[in-house]
Image: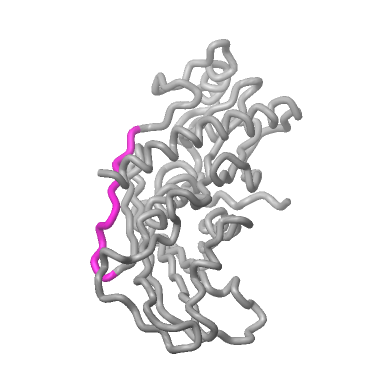
Amino acid sequence: MAPIQASQQTSTPLSPVELSYLHTSLTLTPPIRPDSRSPTQFRPLIAESDILPSTNGSARMIWGDGGECIVGVKAEAEKNSAAPGGSKDWIEINVEVSGQRDDDAFLGMTVAESLLVPGSGVLERLVLGERFHWKVFVDILLLTPPLSHPATLLTLTTYLALRNTFLPKSVSEVAEDPVFDDDWGNALPLYPTDKIPPPITLLVVSVGENIFFDPTREELAVGDIILAVSICGKKVVGVRTLEGGNGGVGRAVIKRVIKESCQVAEEVFGSLNSVEEN
């Protein structure tokens, strides 16, 4: 699978000597990160949901290095068609990066490719009788790109927005044009708590035999390989490499990355769900 471009992963302010010292520190047992975090610890972040009026769901997140992302989700009733895309066109994702060209939409790749995970039941919940369906628009605005790669920031904010997305309840018959309940309290969640949740993507860098989550741009610069691991519930649904790694990595390290990613993702899901409850 082709690596994801990493245009946001720019050169670091560190000299070659400083980068060499950092690489050595990260290969130690136990490793020493510049900000003293443990290998699985994330930088502090601020998250909130339901921030945008006139949307079906929304969220905002500020990353530890200053990156800020806002996601809005809107749904419109649309007539079924025989278009080639079929039901895959029922969800449209748009990514806009402040100050960047429109062709930077590849930043949303890890969001788009794993959103319709088989078994999630999202498409079934978008059906409105025999002739209509919901079309969902996910607008992702990266207000301030983080210093490191934005994949995790994009997907965590999108996850929070989707989990807080509600669709008006249909009260019409199957063969009729859709009519909806005016009581928003009866609205139905796009992702019920008892169903498969939206995916998230975690960025992981390998340095020697050690692996690190939520790497800084300096850690990305000295990494042997950089992986974007997409996880849905307790299952890994995608693993991609990012350009910028300085070497290869053995199968044993890949297995550890996948295993630890599932464990870390479980904690991340719990933290994001607590934001919803608040």
Q: Is residue 53 magenta?
A: yes
Q: Residue at x 25, y 44 (%)?
A: 278
Residue 110 location, x and y as percent?
56, 53
Residue reaching furthest right?
251
Q: Residue at x 69, y 31 (%)?
A: 254
Residue 232 location, x and y as percent?
56, 46
Residue reaching furthest top?
29
Determine if residue 98 is in view: no
- Please determine whether, in this image, residue 90 is positioned above or below residue 153: below
Question: How many marks overall?
Answer: 0
Viewer-side residue, 30 vs 259: 259
Q: Is residue 211 magenta?
A: no
Q: Which residues are magenta?
A: 44-54
Q: Residue at x 65, y 27 (%)?
A: 256
Residue 274 location, x and y as percent?
33, 40
Determine if residue 224 is in view: yes
Q: Main secondary structure of the magenta part?
A: loop
Viewer-side residue, 22 vs 230: 230
- Please determine whether, in this image, residue 183 is positioned above or below residue 147: below
On the rendered structure, is 129 left or right of 82? Answer: left
Q: Quadrant of residue 46?
A: top left
Residue reaching furthest front?
173
On the rendered structure, is 95 left or right of 231? Answer: left
Residue 158 location, x and y as percent?
42, 54
